[in-house]
Amino acid sequence: MKSITVFCGSSFGTEEIYKDQAVLLGQTLAKQNIKLIYGGANVGLMGAVADGVLNAGGEAIGVLPDFLRSKEIAHLGLTELIFVESMHERKTKMNDLCEGVIALPGGFGTLEELFEMLTWAQLGLHKKPIAILNINGFYDSLIELTKTMVEKGLLKDVNQKMLLVSDNIDDLLNQMKNYVAPTVGKWIEKKEL
């Protein structure tokens, strides 16, 4: 695995461990020669993971929509900063540049990005590992919700298991490196009458 996209908050959140783990993830990626692809900002957990990579001698590529350029949040110390027209183009570019995805704590934007990548995988548009670094149980409720989706017949078990989860960076990266995409498609078969 040579490049991973990280989705995470543009703020730090309320727990110091979120920032600490974002920095540690960045350092770990750099040590393993894995290029960081992320949203290009210098703020919050986004900036922390990028700084972790860069301070450990790694490569960090940011993808930032033009409308955010004027808000002065662009990280100017990146290996490369790519400007795109829209949020949709940003996600597409980040997908094109990466071999896997990790979500750290974040808000609506992080969830939207995570679930779009999961949906694309479910539809067979890519076979990349999609993972959550579940820092301090941040995503416990979301993981339970995905299990409820399976129990209620709205999500296949094989698709729910596409979402890799760990609270340990090394374990999560090992899961990603050993990931094999399911061969079952999304669509539930019609039962014969």
Image (spheres, helix red, strand yellow):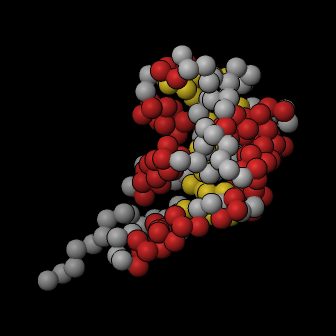
Can you say which quadrant of the picture contains the C terminus? bottom left
Percent across and percent down for residue 162 are: 53, 63
Residue farthest to the bottom, as pictured: 193
Near-viewer residue (21 or 174): 21
Q: Residue furthest left?
A: 193
User: Which image quadrant for residue 60?
Assistant: top right
- Relative to residue 87, is residue 144 depicted above or below? below
Task: Tell me if 28 is positioned left or right of 145 in this view.
Answer: right
Q: Report the front residue among 107 and 183.
A: 107
Q: Residue at x 74, y 46 (%)?
A: 19
Residue 83 lies, in percent from the top left, at: 54, 21
The answer to whether any part of residue 83 appears in the image is no
Q: Is residue 80 left or right of residue 182?
A: right
Residue in view at x 43 percent, y 58 percent: 122
In this orientation, which residue lies closer to the viewer: 72 or 162?
A: 72
State the image quarter where residue 29 is shown.
top right
* Residue 57 seen in this snapshot: yes
User: Residue 77 falls in which quadrant of the image?
Assistant: top right
x 47%, y 35%: residue: 92
Given residues 99 and 92, the one toward you in this image is 92
Write the residue at 68% across / 24% down. Answer: 75
Q: How many marks?
A: 0
Q: List x then y, in percent, for residue 72.
A: 61, 19
Q: Is residue 38 above or below residue 77?
A: below
Q: Is residue 18 above or below residue 64?
A: below
Residue at the outermost top position: 70
Question: Residue 166, image x and y in percent?
Answer: 68, 64
